[in-house]
Amino acid sequence: MVNPNVSSQPKICYRPIRPSDLDILEHIHGRLFPIRYESTFFHDVVNGRDIVSWGAVDSNRSDGRSDELIGFVTARIVLAKESEIVDMLGYDSARSDQTLVYVLTLGVVEAYRSFGIASSLIREVIKYASSIPTCRAVYLHVISYNNPAINLYKKMSFKCVRRLQGFYLINGQHYDSFLFLNYVNGGRSPCSPLEILTAIVSFMRSGFKSVAARLCRSGSRKISRRAKCKESHSLVSATPNKRNVAVECSGYECV
């Protein structure tokens, strides 16, 4: 049942997708997406073969389907160095042990699209990715005309980092894709030219300040020696009164 009647007080719960969800999972994908997935994909999802997944159910449904999926998200761990976004990551994320979580599919049946289920499912993915010490980002593709999904990802702090021309081929027609990225565990983008220039300018300024400080200290030592010589000469050539000594010292301290 893809478009169930929503219970008067829905209680949305989240759980891993199980083998018993195979038929409904495949059915919902067929109804929601214009892309057809291989049967092996669904078997990999429900059996957890290299794919992690979460399902949403309404435990208050009165039609006997309280454990039937009304939403889902599927994802896979990939090596950062082998991903298409390795150039969007900081240098350390290209190391052999760095990973990413790639969102494969996300969907909610139409009757339940106003309950924040998609946001909750994506949060589950982000939480999962954050629990993996080597993971640096969650990323995904979205077709260019899917404005609700685009707005959702932006709302959840994903950044649109790239537009891919003709990424999807649907019914003989090409469609563009946006690539969205959400950094986790200290992941970051490489320094942009502007950031590099800013860092160089900052370094040069700090260097100039350091040189200026050393020059000031050197100048102060020279002035100190001159002042001491002058004071010694005054003591030798004449016996100064207290006022003269005070002026001499006051002038030295001001410098």
Image (cartoon, rainbow, N blue to C red):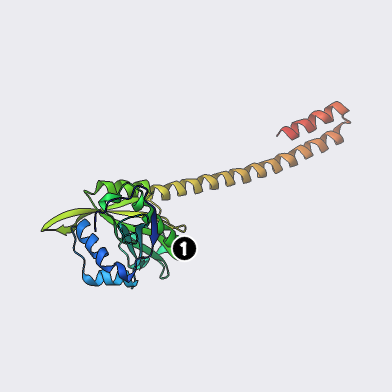
On screen, residue 137 above or below 9: below
- Of residue 160 and residue 67, the one placed in the foreground of this image is 67
- Of residue 4 and residue 253, the one placed in the foreground of this image is 4
Which residue is under mark 1? 131
Occupied quadrant, residue 32: bottom left
On screen, residue 108 above or below 250: below
Q: Where is residue 169 in the image (x, y as percent from the top left)?
A: 15, 59
Q: Residue at x 26, y 64 (%)?
A: 24
Q: Which residue is drawn at 36% across and 46% down?
A: 155
**Total numbered badges shown on the rendered structure:** 1
Is residue 64 in view? yes
Residue projecting furthest to the top: 243
Give the class, few, some or many, for how many residues have Cα within 10 Å of label 1's Cα (few <14, many ≥20): few
- Of residue 149 and residue 84, the one placed in the foreground of this image is 149
Is residue 86 in view? no
Q: What residue type is labelled 1?
A: Ser
Position of residue 28 in the picture relative to residue 62 (left or right): left
Q: In which quarter of the image is the N terminus?
A: bottom left
Q: Quadrant of the C terminus?
A: top right
Q: Position of residue 35 (x, y in %)?
A: 19, 60
Q: Is mark 1 on a helix, strand or loop?
A: loop
- Of residue 50 and residue 99, the one placed in the foreground of this image is 50
Occupied quadrant, residue 130: bottom left
Residue projecting furthest to the left: 172
Q: Where is residue 31 in the image (x, y as percent from the top left)?
A: 20, 58
Position of residue 27 in the picture relative to residue 61 (left or right): left
Q: Where is residue 223 in the image (x, y as percent from the top left)?
A: 71, 39
